[in-house]
Amino acid sequence: MTQPWLHIVGIGEDGMDGLTPATRAVVEAAEVILGGDRHHTLSANPTAERIAWPSPFDAMIDTIRSLKGRRAVVLVTGDPLWFSVGARIGKAIPPAEITYHPQLSAFQLAAARMGWSLADVETLTVHGRPVEQMIAFIQPDQRLLILTTGAETPAQIAKFLTDRGFGQSPMTVLAAMGGKEEQRFDGTAATWSHIVPPFNTLAVDCIAAPDAALLPRVPGLPDDLFQSDGTMTKQEVRAVTVAKLMPMRGALLWDIGTGCGSVAIEWIRAARYARAIGIEPRADRRAMAAANALALGAPGLRIIDGEAPAVLEGLDKPDAIFIGGGLTSDVFPAAWAALRPLGRLVANAVTLESEAELFALHATHGGQLTKLSVQRAEPVGRLTGWKPHMTVTQWSLIKR
């Protein structure tokens, strides 16, 4: 039976005093301790060999594996498995070889300081990640707890809130929680001017003005939120398309012919940690897709220059594929072969030629064919009439 040899210990601002007796004994008995400078300062063990986080950080796993056979401790902040490096280590080293020692997380401490129910709060991290990803969570009456990247992050988030009509949202920065140097900074997004410590947690109570932008995470954002040359998948069709693609936590979408990125962006926004690769041969459209991804809280959208099927080889296998442009007889076989089991494929067509391709594919592979027709009321002189959009033929199926 495999015996744990690696201890991953969460530690707080109160250092060794905050550890349980059993965990404290593990740290005091360690032969080697790996962690950041702050962690080493907080942990007392005069005899242990000290190792700093390796540079580049990707070398961490090899460094940790080299410690096997010794009494090894990795120190992290708070809960090792909640937005922490402990989860990353656990993917590379068998869980049976690891003992985790959780400490109170920054989220738990912040919720207690704010008097918020943690079950009713969105917990996010932008630490070492694009700050723009939090934009998707700006909703009326939503409370956010955010692990930040540094001292500048609260001001960046304050601007995101203000630009979207949430400038009156109360913001609180909490630093060194649980330690002797604990600090608190309160303000509102529109007037935020505090200079805060680099290591902090941000609490936001989202308050919407009457004219605030409403950006729900369900698909179907208004068309005018996207930079576009007019060829984008329109709002109503996009909502149906993303629903058929079924966004799921951590799932990967290939958006073939991504255009301005509207479908890929809605996919990313709809599920936690959803990922997307947009494939687009035109530089102007790739630029629009990148700008839209940042503005709408999907900075992780990966955009590739090229045309399918040539650029598909070597990409991570997708959980869903959308073909919104460039459907040809050679694109489907390559895409279908790459799609994971239970993967979803949706293809939209507006031309007679593309529609004929969908009819032929449906005859061979089955699935569902749908005709989507949308009309919007628009002024006709002093009156109002219905203006039809181009009818879309949609083919969707699940790989069994």
Image (spheres, grey):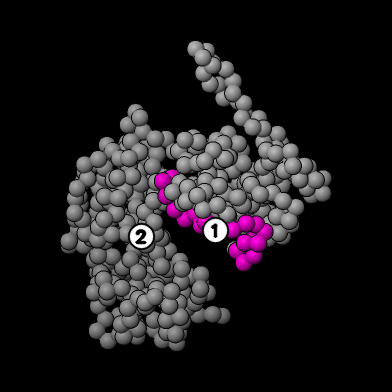
Q: Quadrant of residue 333?
A: bottom right
Q: What secondary structure prevails in the magenta region?
A: loop
Callout 1 amino acid: Ile
Q: Is there any visible trace of residue 150 in the rendered image?
A: yes
Residue 300 is covered by the magenta coloring: yes
**Foreground pick, 227 / 12:** 227
Residue 265 badge: none
Callout 2 amino acid: His
x, y (%) of residue 180? 17, 62
Instruction: Identify whether 122 is placed above or below 377.
Output: below
Q: CA distance from mark 2 to mark 1?
A: 26 Å
> Which residue corresponds to the image point at 19% horizontal and 50% vertical from the top-left?
194
Q: Is residue 149 left or right of residue 93?
A: left
**Residue under label 2:** 127
Q: Considering the numbered disc 1 on the image, is that residue within a helix, a strand or a loop?
A: strand
**Foreground pick, 386 / 372:** 386
x, y (%) of residue 396? 70, 44
Q: Residues within 10 Å of mark 1 (few under 14, many from 20)?
A: some
> Which residue corresponds to the image point at 45% horizontal and 80% vertical from the top-left?
62
x, y (%) of residue 302? 51, 57
Image quadrant holding the C terminus, namely: bottom right
**Residue under label 1:** 304
- Range of the magenta residues? 294-315
